[in-house]
Image (cartoon, rainbow, N blue to C red):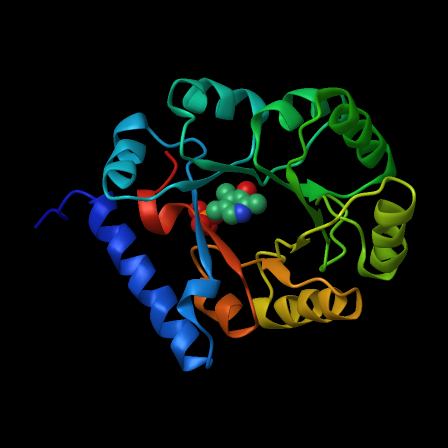
Amino acid sequence: MSEPPHDPAAALAAVLRRIDKAARAAGRDPADVTLTAVSKQQPPERVAAVLIAGQRVFGENRVQEARARWTERRADLELRLIGPLQSNKAGEAVAFFDVIESLDRDKLARALAGEIQAQGRSPRLYVQVNTGEEPQKAGVVPAEADAFLKACRDTYGFNIEGLMCVPPADEEPAMHFALLAKIAARNGLRKLSMGMSGDFETAVRFGATSVRVGSALFGGRG
Ligand SMILES: *Cc1c(COP(=O)(O)O)cnc(C)c1O
């Protein structure tokens, strides 16, 4: 028997139910958890299906791809950049996104500050923390997070909204979520972007205020 075709609208309803259940189980208000639908590399018909089903918050990991996909359908959406950002794309990112979740170094902070000033447009900002200290991964290492957050406030005048992490693929995510929550708490930050298709319920248990879910919603990325 062949499997039925993936139905993104049904998957959206199922993911929202799972978020709701995980939040209640943790004694949290489900309304405090936002679903970011990660539409990167997904075909337009799958994305259209969740748009029709009412989803309005989307995550993309590339500026170029996001602009190509969303420029014509920008109104009433919240678009979040969740992938690494090069300093020379800071201007495009500030112009296009509502939220940038991948701020992780001084050079990028300086570029963003300049663009925010020049454009008079301020996307909400998250600092990405490389909780697993993986050399190939973006993010400030935990030991440098406090100092970087201080520089974001004092040097660049940013009002950082929260922290984001992508735990190592081969490790128990819970300890990484707990670490991110701890760094946020000691820096007075309330928002945590953490949890993906394989672990978003765990992330909700550890305090995620937004979860970034791609394949569980849209199906695999080719
Ligand atoms: C691709 C991506 C996701 C979504 O991953 P899934 O496992 O498909 O849910 C979440 N966060 C980031 C930063 C990503 O690049």
Residue 168 horizontal/vertical position (percent): 63, 57
Residue pushed farthest front? 120
Residue 82, horizontal then vertical, whole percent: 58, 41
**In the image, is residue 89 above or below residue 195?**
above
Work out which quarter of the rendered image holds the C terminus and state it.
Answer: top left
Give the side of residue 162 with respect to residue 55, left or right. right
Residue 216 in view (yes/no): yes
Say left or right for 111 vs 161: right
In the figure, residue 181 lies in which quadrant?
A: bottom right
- In the foreground, 208 or 74: 74
Q: Position of residue 202 (x, y in %)?
A: 49, 70
Residue visible at 70% across and 45% down in the picture: 137
Q: Nearer the viewer, residue 171 or 188?
A: 188
> At x 73% / y 53%, what residue is drawn?
130
Q: Is residue 179 left or right of residue 29?
A: right
Residue located 66% across and 27% down the image: 94
How many dots with numbers? Answer: 0
Residue 99 rendering spot, x and y as whole percentages:
59, 40
Mark yes or no: residue 219 visible: no
Q: Is residue 168 above or below residue 69?
A: below
Residue at image location 41% in from the left, 36% down from the top:
39
